[in-house]
Image (cartoon, helix red, strand yellow):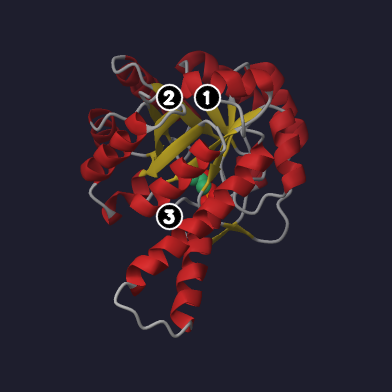
Amino acid sequence: MPKITLKEILEDANSRKYAVGAFNVVDSHFLEAIVKTAEECSSPVILNIAEVHFPYFNISALSAMIQKRIEQSIIPITLNLDHGLTMENIKIALDCGFSSIMYDGSHLEFEKNIEQTRIVVELCKSYNVSVESELGAVGGAEGGELVGEADPLKYTDIEQAKIFVKETGVDALAVAIGNSHGKYKGEPKLDFDRLKTLNSELGIPLVLHGGSGISEDDFKKAIKFGISKINFFTGMSQAALQTAKEFFDGTQEKYNNYLLMNQKIEKSIKDIVIEQMNIFGSIGRV
Ligand code: 13P
Ligand code: ZN
């Protein structure tokens, strides 16, 4: 099936009140675990590749492999640049065939964020590619410290968000409501009142970053109040590391140990993805 845009994949989620998981791919094992799970569960899925992960692989080779896998698949899949920070890498992603760009101007002043996001939206239009952007700032940093914390002073401002969406024409907005990248310091406390108002005022799908560590109840509430895309990475990478650690604590001495370990890693990622898809309500939606 050809890949689809973020706008297309979120339309159904938004109207039928479930969320599509956006899982980060960093190698062929993550790719296979995520896509195979989505196929087995008849779930739509978004594949994220984060700009901060570019130094760890060959982006054009990895995206070519991903696109081949998407073409072979029978479920709707969106290929999204996660936290695009520079025009240079956004252009690389567009030329590699991504169908969605998340532009992260959350570190910029409000006016500058609008100005830069507009430039990205214009550019992406010519490729027929969707744009997600971020207003306020999600806690922690993708690719930064393992434990992150949300700063209430950086939560998404409702009045600013109305102006931002109107002036930029983005297809989806990542909100800062107490969510944070990496592991949470203590229990996450999401500002659901803010989310509810953002949802009723903005009229576009909202995105929750920092999915790892949020409880089932909170995910369900967030979806009820307008979240249609949930970004998730740390939970998978921690599970993969734990599996590798347990594997090497064992005493296997086989020629194909490395391959066997990767098989187990893939299985551990699959288990996490199925658990999340179940909570997000995306199973059986294809
Ligand atoms: P976690 O790593 O906290 O799950 O967040 C992922 C994310 O937001 C990717 O953009
Ligand atoms: Zn994120």
Q: Can the viewer see residue 234 in this picture?
A: no
Relative to 116, does residue 89 appear above or below in the rendering?
below
Q: Earlier in the sequence, mark 1 or mark 2?
A: 2
Q: Amino acid at mark 2?
A: Val
The answer to whether marks 1 and 2 mark residues whose Cβ atoms lie closer than 8 Å is yes
x, y percent for residue 260 = 39, 68
How crowded pointer 3 is (Cα within 10 Å; few <14, some 14-19, many 20+) is rated as few
In 3D space, how far apart are the residues under numbered discs 1 and 2 (Cα atoms)?
A: 7 Å
Q: Amino acid at mark 1?
A: Ala
Using residue 35 as the reference point, say whether residue 253 is left or right of it. left
x, y percent for residue 191 = 74, 39
Mark 3, residue position: 143
Which residue does the image show at 36% across and 49% down from the upper left? 52
Question: Residue 104 lies in what quarter of the image?
Answer: top left
Using residue 55 as the reference point, say whether residue 197 is left or right of it. right
How crowded pointer 2 is (Cα within 10 Å; few <14, some 14-19, many 20+) is rated as many
Q: Earlier in the sequence, mark 1 or mark 3?
A: 3
**Image quarter of the N terminus:** top left
Which residue does the image show at 48% across and 18% down from the upper left? 8
Q: Can the viewer see residue 124 in this picture?
A: yes
Callout 2 secondary element:
strand
Task: Please tell me which residue lies in front, 247 or 108.
Answer: 247
Which residue does the image show at 47% across and 30% down from the upper left? 133
Q: Which disc is residue 172 wearing?
A: 1
In 3D space, how far apart are the residues under numbered discs 1 and 3 (Cα atoms)?
A: 22 Å
Label 3 lies in ligand 1 vicinity (Cβ under 8 Å) = no
x, y percent for residue 200 = 71, 18
Mark 2, residue position: 131
Q: Amino acid at mark 3?
A: Gly
Please count the marks in the image. Answer: 3
